[in-house]
Image: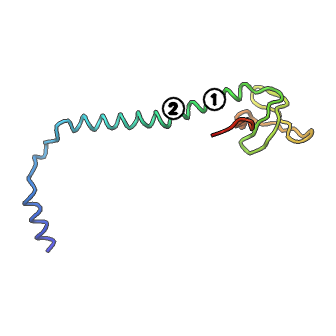
């Protein structure tokens, strides 16, 4: 039964030459690939780079007295700023030295 259906379908379908392709098929393929990369860049890579630049600017602009949150979730107030690290005052006179790259945001800033 299946063999009969397959035979009928093969006889009904017109045979296309092996080297023939649809006109403009290759160009349309490349246009789609380029469009896909452009959309990916526009909606994924570009916003991520912008966010990284804003975070880097925030870290470079830290000053004594700024309230921050670390990547580990520690809330603190900047007590001292050095080139690669920041000393945070976390509770009373308790101070922690953390790398600048671990500071992720300002708790007063509304994040969407």
Q: Who's the residue at 79% across and 26% down the image?
A: 63
Pick whichever, 16 or 47, lies toward us. 47
Residue 77: percent from the left, percent from the top? 83, 35
Residue 66: percent from the left, percent from the top? 80, 30
- Mark 1, secondary structure of its residue: helix
Provide the residue designation for mark 2: 46
Q: Who's the residue at 8% across and 53% down the image?
A: 14
Q: In the displayed structure, does residue 49 sit left or right of residue 9?
A: right
Q: Who's the residue at 78% across and 37% down the image?
A: 98
Q: Are marks 2 and 1 in contact (CB under 8 Å)?
A: no
- Mark 2, secondary structure of its residue: helix
Q: Which mark is residue 98?
A: none
Residue 17: percent from the left, percent from the top? 10, 46
State which tag comes first along the sequence, 2 or 1. 2
Pick whichever, 30 or 44, lies toward us. 44
Q: Residues within 10 Å of mark 2 (few under 14, many from 20)?
A: few
Quarter residue 73 falls in: top right
Provide the residue designation for mark 1: 54
Residue 9: percent from the left, percent from the top? 12, 62
Location of the C terminus by quadrant is top right
Please say which color scheme the image uses.
rainbow
Q: Residues within 10 Å of mark 1 (few under 14, many from 20)?
A: few
Q: CA distance from mark 2 to mark 1?
A: 13 Å
Quarter residue 13 falls in: bottom left
Q: Who's the residue at 9% across and 65% down the image?
A: 8
Residue lying at the far right in this picture: please name it. Answer: 93
Q: In the displayed structure, does residue 21 sit left or right of residue 90?
A: left
Location of the N terminus by quadrant is bottom left
Q: In the displayed structure, does residue 34 sit left or right of residue 2?
A: right
Q: Please tell me how many numbered marks the rendered image carries.
A: 2
């Amino acid at each position: 039964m299946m063999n009969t259906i397959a035979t009928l379908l093969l006889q009904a379908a017109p045979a296309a030459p092996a080297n023939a392709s649809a006109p403009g098929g290759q160009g349309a393929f490349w246009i789609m690939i380029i469009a896909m990369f452009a959309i990916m860049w526009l909606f994924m890579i570009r916003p991520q780079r912008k966010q990284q630049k804003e975070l880097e600017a925030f870290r470079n602009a830290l000053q004594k007295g700024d309230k921050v949150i670390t990547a580990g979730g520690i809330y603190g107030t900047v007590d001292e700023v050095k080139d690669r690290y920041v000393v945070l005052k976390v509770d009373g006179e308790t101070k922690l030295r953390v790398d600048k790259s671990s500071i992720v945001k300002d708790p007063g800033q509304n994040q969407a």
